[in-house]
Amino acid sequence: MRSKKTGDTSNMTLLQDSERGINALGSAKKGKAALEDPKLLQSDMLPLSSPASSGFPKRRGLSWVLFAILSVLCVLVSPVRRSNIFSPASHLDFSREEPVADMLAGMGFTGNGRTNDVLWDKYSLIIKGQRVFIHSGEFHTFRLPVPGLWLDILQKVKAAGFNAISVYSHMVLINPSPGVVDFNDYRALEPLYEAAKQTGIWIVLRPGPYINAETTAGGIAHWITSEVAGELRTNATDWHAAWQDYVQGVITETAPYQVTKGGPVIAIQIDNEYSQEPATHAEYFRELETVYLNSSIVVPLTANDPGEERAWINGTGAVNIYGMDSYPQGFDCSNPEVWSPVVTNYYSYHDSVDPGQPWYFPEFQGGSFDAWGPTAPGYDQCRILTGANFENVFNLNLWASNAKLINYYMLYGGTSWGALPFPGVYTSYDYGSAIAENRELTVKYPELKRQGLFLRSSPDFYKTDWVGNSTGGIVSVSNPAAFVTLLRNPDSVASFYIARQGNSTTTDVTTFKLNVSTSAGNFVIPRSTSGITLGGRQSKIIVTDYSFGSSSKVLYSTAQVLFAGQIGGRDVLFLYGDPTSESEAALTLSGTPRIQGAGVSSVSSNGVTTVTFLPGIQGLITIWDSSEQLVLYSDTDTAGTFWSPEIPANDSVEFANYWQFGTNSSILVGGPYLVRNATITGSTLALRGDLNDSVQLTVIAPDDVKTVTWNGIPISADVAAVSNLTAQGGFVAQLKLSSTVLGFAPPALTGWKYADSLPEIRSGFSDANWTLANHTTTNIPFKPYYGDGRVLYGCDYGYCENIVLWRGHFNATENTQIVNLSINGGEAFATTVWVNDVFLNTSYGNSTNNRNILEETDDKFHFPLGSLLYGRENVITILQDNMGLNESGSIIDEERSPRGVRGFMLNTGDFGEWKVQGKVGGYTNYLDKVRGVLNEGGLYGERMGWHLPGFDTSSWALRDLSEGLPNAAAGVGFFVTTFNLSIPDGFDVPMSFMFDDTSQPYRSQLYVNGWMMGKRVSNLGPQYQFPVQQGILDYNGINTVAVALWAMEPKAVTPTLQLTIEGVYEGGVGGIETNNPPWSPKGRQ
């Protein structure tokens, strides 16, 4: 059979009338709709899409109304009946016709009154007439500041069966100063939207202005924290004015990419995790919503309630679609084997507060952030706490609550480079995610893929009623230790029994039998095996009356479904189970079998074959192979090695890359590390993906595929292996790594050059060009503790980010003995103080895994004998690290953190001038417009641009980084070296810079080709390894690495740094551009 790029309809979910059996309207020609063959009316349905593709002119008057009414009778929302007709290019469009909008609303579909391209009912979203389960993962592009790599992440998201991402945009970066809105480079939204269209991924945009996200000030532009007097995140007039430019910029960038325009954006979230009370909060939401409503944005507006607070469902500021966030394991990964139990009231809460809308989780736990401190566990532990077992039990518990819009936070965490973090976290934002910070797939990824492919294969699951569970008597189980929830599709009566342990934290093995109601009657399953086994922390989905392909049925299955659909005209089912236990499936098999697998037994009765999968099955086996059906089975791990790339439609088809919209055709591919995409042209199947080892490639494709290529290279089939798989449409071959892979070795970092970066403490240093710190008022609500009335907060002078230096001038007498300083830098900060050129001491902020937090210090510094110049001017120099601004908390306007000097006082006498210096230009005139406002701080070396590629260090001293600062002094030095990379195209080679894993009194900032990619705090930890991406690293050229080393005490420190290769992958997305502007003298002198 010839493969059609538009694919089959086996997994298509369309609006239909399953009772009346009204068929899809056929091709649109010359403005007329022709009904298909009446013989097909029992199974076909009504696709919907855009007016451009439908070919229907707009009509008015009675004839149109009658036509519209007839059309609407075709569209009761229901999973698709398997059909042989699918033509995305001829979908009808109801989105522009008001009579139809009224009819849709009358049938229980809800919209925002601005578009019918995104509707909803109590079950799910309906996009362009298709019922859709939003299966989403969180991805922050600003944490991967290489736009070319966004496609890499999206392809990995799509390959795992996801159909959407949720994305924060970052006001600090985009709106760095008043009147400036910058959507260039990594701040851009357009390349993300284009990559999403290319990949077939929907987007829920979450622009804030406040986003939380463990980022400085929760994303609120730093200039606002000092220049706006009114309370933030309220209806205060000046706050309202402050966010206008940013939000209008987001609207301008996003409006052309809404789903109504053929783009990926289906919803926009209003602010983030906020209470609806007091009234000033609600009015703020109303004002934000009004801006969107008065714009060209027409997609629904959403909100994320931080808990079960019923916020934004009704009343002032209520949004179109309510959502609730949930993190059942919290954010401490110290004991990763110890679980908190599942939340058991998700369904009842939703049913009591918002039963008429789909159940939406804008954020569900996909990992955890990690805190500063020597006892912080690190992200490997977070990846255990929220690992595959957690995903299996807790995600399916979420499904069991009938949630149909789910976003896992995070799916890819990335890097909080520069000054992105809020003080509670360090540079890495790996989050223990399924995709690691360096973009490698982790042990968590296969389970998400198994879940994602099940969802994509199971349109009946998109519309289900919550029937009951085993505690209420609705579901009957033989063992009370098992807890089972029943969801049922009201149209197809397909049922989904979601089973877990009653005690969700137990590691015991539980076996039970289950009473099920099916089209063949009520009975107990399994029938042939001893029971359904939950192997400790495990959940399973037992399906009944489950359809696959065009006409095939599963009466029931205790084995899990990986894939169900149609490939090349055959109905294909892929089941899997644990090799240590039995499972069972009852299927209606058709055709003459040519291959029947070993390790199974079967018995047939009344046209239904019950297959028992015995313990010990490893690898892939064929259960049934006929010209009509293919049934496969494997162990769970093997199932996790399979992919199901979609075959996109022609580019002329709207949403060509979107499942259910442009295509319903896919294949099965097993073996490779990653399969990014697949296309079929004529008889050639072209696969693209990544290898990290030589593997056996297994393909199930349409039987007219005669040639298979991998990354453009034809591969030869293993005919003998194919014969054991299937008699048609199968392909088996060996994929071997290139010998080039074996030749990669990281260059050593040698030849370091050194220069002192603290001339501010030398005699004769002039701060005449620094900013005079003479403010006596501040909009920051946390006022100075003591002093002479002057306010020494960095943000008040434009210096909100990274290291800031202060110099206080005073005349000394013999009685001058002590200076008292209160310094605020945020959790885990440090500050070192000198008088003239004499080290006084270092004050340490603290964090011990987010305990014993100390974000400001108040210390007395004693002047050593001989350190002062009596009767002359002396200078106190304060080197202070700003760890970012706080996020919103229980204290009003906590984002306006008073970073700087909150108190200054000599034991006798007064200070004269105070001067302050941060990065060159502050937030209004910073020099590096590409890397942005958060990249640099106020160190002398940063101000001179020593961290930038191309700066001439030929006059500097040779000094190895491991030697630390000369004379074991306290201070700051810059170390710079270069190294060359030569990595051929077609390889993705994740790399990291690794410091010594020791506790020493030093802090360091790591710059790679000018980007601040890491902040190492050796005395606190835990991070010492810093991934750096291609695009910041030049894979084919000279790279510059700089380390600003801050020795906090007058003792020897011995840091080391090496470049490491984390993996070598043959493949990648390719075409990654570097954008690393070199040093220029402009503004640096």
Image (cartoon, rainbow, N blue to C red):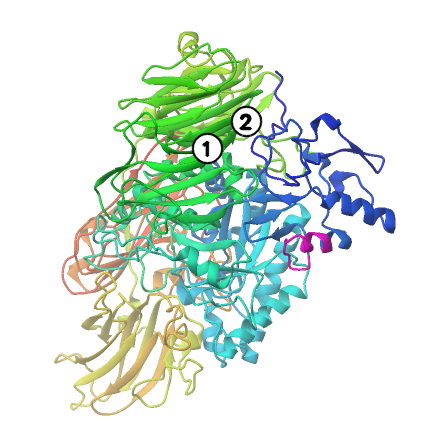
x, y (%) of residue 486? 42, 44
The answer to which image quadrant residue 290 occupies is: bottom right
As drawn, the residue found furthest toward the top would be 720
Q: Nearer the viewer, residue 751 or 182?
A: 182
Say which amino acid is labelled 2: Gly
Quarter of the image with the C terminus in it? bottom left
Q: Residue at x 49, y 51 (%)?
A: 166
Residue at x 53% of width, y 74% of height: 282
Label 1 or label 2, whichever comes before in sequence order? 1
* Above/below status of 685 relative to 518: above
Residue at numbered disc 2: 549
Q: Quadrant of residue 939?
A: bottom left
Amino acid type, mark 1:
Gly
Neighbours of disc 2 within 10 Å: few (<14), some (14-19), many (20+): many
For disc 1, the neighbor class at 10 Å (few under 14, some 14 to 19, many from 20) is few
Q: Is residue 611 above or below residue 350?
A: above
Disc 1, SS = strand
Query: Is residue 238 shown above or below 195?
Result: below
Question: With respect to residue 308, does 657 lie above or below?
Answer: above
Write down the residue under mark 1.
521
Q: Which residues are magenta?
A: 102-114
105 magenta-colored: yes
Judged by its main secondary structure, the magenta piece is: loop
Q: Position of residue 302 (x, y in %)?
A: 54, 60
Residue at 87% across, 51% down:
61
Residue 89 position in % (x across, y down) = 71, 35
Is the C-beta separation of discs 1 and 2 under 8 Å?
A: no
Task: Decide whether residue 1021 is among the magenta residues.
Answer: no
Q: Nearer the viewer, residue 644 or 1084?
A: 644
